Image: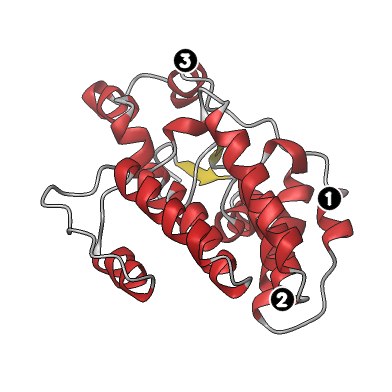
């Protein structure tokens, strides 16, 4: 390749995780950056002013800029591959286990992996455990200066998933309370408003554009 090629992958997203493993194998001459981010890692890096600094001169090493925000993820590529394959198997309707996911070396530090554990538990009919996994992922994000900068539209999917689980468990009051709390933290879009209406809540759509 005549010019340097840099690839950025959010390790909290199973699709990006699997793509990272593929890219390491098929693009050996490219520079790969594993980032504590979601699939929308461009928006994430833009909101932290990293993209602006990189494209200002194209001379700044991305790894230095990423390190300045503690975004570099020292995660084994093999574990990212397994993360992605597990999600792929789940979406295909195949049997997968939470134990295999939990055995990955970065499971406890990755809210995306923990959220996948919740989805696996939900598919297996263990809604209470699924709820606990999501709460664990949210708690991890809330207490991390790095993960708490993840795009809002990604982070708000966690409480919304929790609300749906609470409804399935018959805990409507708790679901309503959580929806009200969530609407105070995240912009209310149409999907969020529709979910609120199923709970008897009339949430107002946010007039501003959703923040990254």
Q: Out of 10 and 166, give the one closest to the viewer.
A: 166
Q: Nearer the viewer, mark 2 or mark 1?
A: 2
Say left or right for 198 vs 29: left
Figure quadrant of the C terminus: top left
Q: Out of 17 and 122, give the one closest to the viewer.
A: 122
Q: Name the residue tied to disc 2.
A: 123
Q: Is residue 156 visible?
A: yes
Question: Is label 3 in a helix, a strand or a loop?
Answer: helix
CA distance separating discs 3 and 1: 29 Å
Say whether disc 2 or disc 1 marks the residue closer to the N-terminus.
1
Question: Is label 2 in a helix, a strand or a loop?
Answer: helix
Dot 1 crowding, Cα within 10 Å, few <14, some 14–19, many 20+? some
Q: Name the residue tied to disc 1.
A: 102
Residue 132, compared with residue 143, is above or below; it is: below
Q: Which mark is residue 68?
A: 3
CA distance separating discs 2 and 1: 17 Å
Q: Quadrant of residue 201?
A: bottom left
Say whether disc 3 or disc 1 marks the residue closer to the N-terminus.
3
Q: Position of residue 151 (x, y in %)?
A: 39, 43
Name the residue located 23 percent from the left edge and 60 percent from the top edge.
Answer: 203
Say whether disc 2 or disc 3 marks the residue closer to the N-terminus.
3
Q: Which mark is residue 51?
A: none
Q: Position of residue 120 (x, y in %)?
A: 73, 68
Name the residue located 13 percent from the left edge and 47 percent from the top edge.
Answer: 208
Q: Out of 50 and 28, give the one closest to the viewer.
A: 50
Q: Nearer the viewer, mark 2 or mark 3?
A: 2
């Amino acid at each position: 390749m005549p010019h340097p090629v840099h690839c950025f992958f959010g390790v909290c997203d199973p699709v990006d995780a699997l793509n990272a493993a593929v890219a390491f194998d098929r693009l050996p001459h490219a520079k790969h950056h594993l980032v504590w981010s979601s699939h929308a890692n461009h928006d994430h890096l833009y909101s932290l002013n990293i993209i602006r600094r990189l494209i200002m001169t194209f001379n700044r090493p991305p790894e230095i800029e990423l390190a300045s925000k503690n975004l570099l993820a020292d995660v084994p590529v093999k574990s990212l591959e397994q993360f992605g394959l597990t999600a792929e198997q789940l979406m295909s309707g195949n049997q997968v286990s939470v134990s295999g996911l939990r055995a990955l070396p970065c499971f406890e530090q990755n809210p995306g992996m923990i959220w996948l554990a919740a989805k696996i538990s939900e598919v297996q009919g263990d809604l209470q455990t699924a709820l606990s996994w999501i709460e664990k992922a949210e708690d991890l994000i809330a207490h991390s200066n790095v993960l708490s900068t993840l795009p809002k539209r990604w982070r708000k999917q966690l409480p919304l998933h929790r609300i749906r689980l609470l409804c399935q468990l018959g805990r409507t009051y708790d679901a309503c309370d959580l929806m009200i709390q969530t609407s105070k933290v995240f912009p209310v879009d149409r999907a969020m408003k529709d979910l609120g209406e199923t709970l008897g809540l009339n949430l107002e759509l946010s007039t501003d554009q959703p923040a990254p």
